[in-house]
């Protein structure tokens, strides 16, 4: 397949490389060109503009936030304006439900196809093609995408015809992740002040009750205070919680736990932790306990 | 071994039965005598008073709360007063850190031994001897207990010499469970109002990111609104959160997420859900969203 | 003075009428024209477009939200595009800090002046010229505005040269009002369930400790459940809390109490209370207590 | 009148002195005897035990918490055991609803009378006889107390026959005070980071909308960071919020705003602010914003 790929951050690089490995022809674009060069050496063509990525059968986007997506997709010379009628825009980014709806409408008007396929997984999972994809869009279009999804993830969940449903699910999942991190942080503060070694508590709780990977990964990061280098930057995590709150507010759903997480993330930014992993809210829990 | 067992609720029954199955001689006591009779038919001797359970090598207690434990252990004719010097009191109950400290001191003064061994697992796990035990107490005493622990659980985590440490860990764990339930309830409210089927969301999230059993168990209860019969009654859940908050306050640790869960549990009681499973806070999340 | 006045809702009507009474010549515009007619009968000229309000020395705006302000001020034929160079745009609306900054820049570029002067006071205070104005902008411009401010309010607080500072203060004040309402609602739920008459509690607390008007006004509304007709609609109140949270997030300030209020306002919307006064969060506090 | 007075802390001293000034004969007791001596020099008799204060017509108690009250009132040689049948125990302390109920029953059994009369006001108000009293108890007993209440306060609110109602109201009021402090702290953090001088904001808000004394008093303390000397110590404030939460939980009322305040108070203790005024939660709001 001829594929364009826009956005080569921590996640995008691994995904693009897996699409290459699967035998596709790739045109890649990144705002900071230097990040594209590693892929160039592996056979990708480096595009000078997003539009140059829109000449094939598919264009994938993996961008940091709504603003980046709007700039790349909806402006002059953007994806919607330049993508051929038969081609598909696959949005892997965690963007707002509202923007996903706007993109769906814009592509429909333009005659091209749009699929939302946000992913669960940290950069290592992206590199290892072990992502979980949450995909929604027209069934026939999703069927065309499936071989590509198989090249980058371990499983695809299909959520129906409406792309924004996938974004809502992704935001709900990230909210649950942040909630798990918050509970880990508070629990660790509690046991530490009762003279229990964090590592012992984590070993216990993650081998008995909370056996899911996020508890192991984030528990270790918090206990060892290894918030750098960040697998997922705090400002991006805050953005996702903000989007979850917005998606909830749009349908009159209060998310008090998301509000709590948001407040702690803002406190973390105020403390200068903006370059750290979003699990740094666990550090805030410690500091609030005087640790 | 000659063992006394006091407290035959949802959890105690299964545990006592597994001690019987392992070939021990059991004297059982329950405040409501009828609950003891099923065990009587399986070979246990039914005791008329807690004191009658305190004539062997061990006495296990599995009681609802601090008040019940105080009444059984610290009053006239209670465990501390009647247990022989060489014998061991094994407290499986989720009680306060403060009471566990008092029990440790009282037993030490009385010459008997005290071990805290609270458990993780719902009634089905208790019946299947699949519990996780969190044990703390003098090493030599724990070594004597281990064969009995093996009869009732799948694994024992030893936390050191100070019994109350086990209680702190158990409370931290239950707090994390309640937090997971809260995040499930809020996430389900969010996706439901975006027209996503709860079962589909749960299947997705529990087979990808949150693969740990609590997410599957509580997710299903909330999505299907099967809060009765309760595996763990709301008032007992609230008691545990209250104890976690107290254990935290004693060492100046704020637990804002526990506060949030507590508030929702109280709202659930105010709505008349006192006979339901503690995961009914998921129903509160739905109701707050108008569902 | 020749003044244009755009936005004749609950607040705008009373303010505009007081400007008329003070002897000014008024051109008024409202999206729903019928609301302008009452003022027409009192001597105001009814304008067919916002631009027709921009031919005098001042144009006042009292609009519901950022979207309304953007449409009226920044679009084609909007205030910024049509206001004469010497004239002043006085924004009484509670809008975002970000939009106020954008308006200040746009007016500066266009050569006209911009002043932010949001007000504290309910519709009765607007009608009685008893508002408190929080004004910020170039000192010379504010001096020109002062006689008009005197016609509509009882006191003007000047906050310096930067208009957005006035908006930040207004948002902080509305946040404090919503917080007072939340505390009243929770306190009333508590005393009611201890069999204390709400009116007795309110009389006590507002004649001893909390003698400020908002406690009397909102206490009575909550105790008597007189949420209709709304002095200040819930969706507008939620908008203000959202703006306060955004203004805080922009400078890395967590506002956990604002988050709590926001969550209760969203729950109120989910319960169908969108036509009620924003103090209906007091009703949510009652309902959470089973009242 | 012959009056005993037990508890001569910040509040008790001023109150006792006003009872003296009004011409009563006073026997005073304080655990730390040195604090009683100032009153001795003004004509009070210094008692060596609480029981020595229980020989007159009235005994007033102004104690720090439930534990102190239990020790003084319910132990051997305590108030209940020693007070003459016709005499009255006037409890000015902020104690729990539950303990107030126990005291009422104990006095009734002993044949003496019990009145709860907690007060609103800081130490300066106590010294100036400007307190507000919230009194509840048998009507005839309250009538006998009224001249004494007039000697120490500016107004007495009578809440009916059941003493604990007065305690519930006092706790609700203190909860509202702490909520006002929390809102001040967060609002000040917000405006400070928008470059608005705290003093200017406070002058504005307390002369327009929030004209009640607590906003002026606590606003100034927070803005000037004058948390020492404490008018009301943080640990005592936390105790009151804990009692409010307990009184609410007893009747199934969630108080999420009280939970929030409690968490911030615990964080303040964890930061070593235990010797400061309870309004130090305003400092926590600043610190969470990086100020």
Image (cartoon, coloured by chain):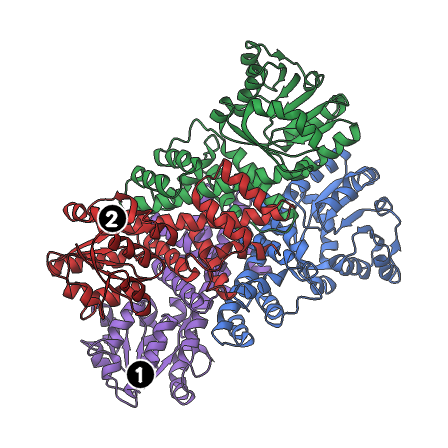
Chain colours: A red, B green, C purple, D blue
**Residue found at x 64% / y 59%:** D271
Q: Which residue is mark 2?
A: A149
In the picture, measured across the screen, residue B146 lies left or right of residue D210, that is: right
**Residue found at x 28% / y 60%:** A42
Q: Residues within 10 Å of mark 1 (few under 14, many from 20)?
A: many
Quarter of the figure with the C terminus of chain D: bottom right
Question: Is there any visible trace of residue C44 in the rendered image?
Answer: no
Q: Is residue D29 above or below residue D70?
A: below
Q: Which residue is mark 1?
A: C107
In the picture, measured across the screen, residue B248 lies left or right of residue B218, that is: right
Q: Which chain is home to disc 2?
A: A
* Relative image position of residue A32 (x, y in whole percent): 32, 70
Q: Nearer the viewer, residue B11 or D200?
A: B11
Label 1 and label 2: CA atoms lie apart by 50 Å
Q: Nearer the viewer, residue A17 or A278?
A: A17
Q: Nearer the viewer, residue A74 or A92?
A: A92
Q: Secondary structure at mark 2?
A: helix
């Amino acid at each position: 397949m001829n594929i364009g790929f826009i956005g080569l951050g921590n996640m995008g690089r691994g995904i693009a490389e897996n699409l290459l490995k699967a035998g596709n022809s790739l045109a890649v674009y990144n705002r900071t060109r230097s990040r594209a060069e590693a892929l160039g050496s592996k056979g990708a063509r480096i595009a000078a503009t997003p539009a140059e990525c829109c000449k094939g059968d598919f264009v994938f986007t993996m961008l940091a936030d709504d603003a980046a997506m709007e700039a790349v997709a909806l402006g002059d010379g953007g994806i919607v304006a330049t993508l051929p009628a038969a081609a598909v825009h696959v949005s892997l980014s965690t963007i707002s439900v509202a923007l996903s709806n706007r993109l769906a409408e814009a592509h429909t008007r333009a005659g091209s196809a749009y699929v939302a396929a946000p992913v669960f997984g940290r950069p290592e999972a992206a590199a290892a093609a072990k992502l979980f994809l949450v995909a929604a869009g027209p069934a026939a279009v999703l069927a065309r995408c499936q071989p590509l999804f198989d090249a980058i993830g371990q499983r695809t969940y299909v959520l129906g015809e409406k792309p924004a449903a996938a974004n809502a699910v992704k935001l709900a999942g990230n909210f649950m992740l942040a909630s798990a991190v918050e509970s880990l942080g508070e629990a660790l503060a509690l046991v530490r002040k009762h003279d229990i070694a964090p590592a012992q508590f984590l070993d216990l709780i993650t081998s008995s009750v909370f056996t899911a990977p996020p508890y192991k990964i984030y528990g270790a990061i918090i206990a060892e205070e290894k918030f750098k280098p960040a697998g997922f930057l705090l400002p991006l995590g805050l953005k996702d919680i903000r989007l979850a709150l917005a998606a909830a507010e749009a349908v009159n759903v209060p998310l008090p736990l998301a509000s709590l997480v948001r407040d702690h993330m803002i406190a973390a930014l105020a403390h200068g932790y903006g370059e750290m992993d979003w699990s740094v809210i666990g550090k805030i829990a410690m500091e609030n306990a005087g640790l």
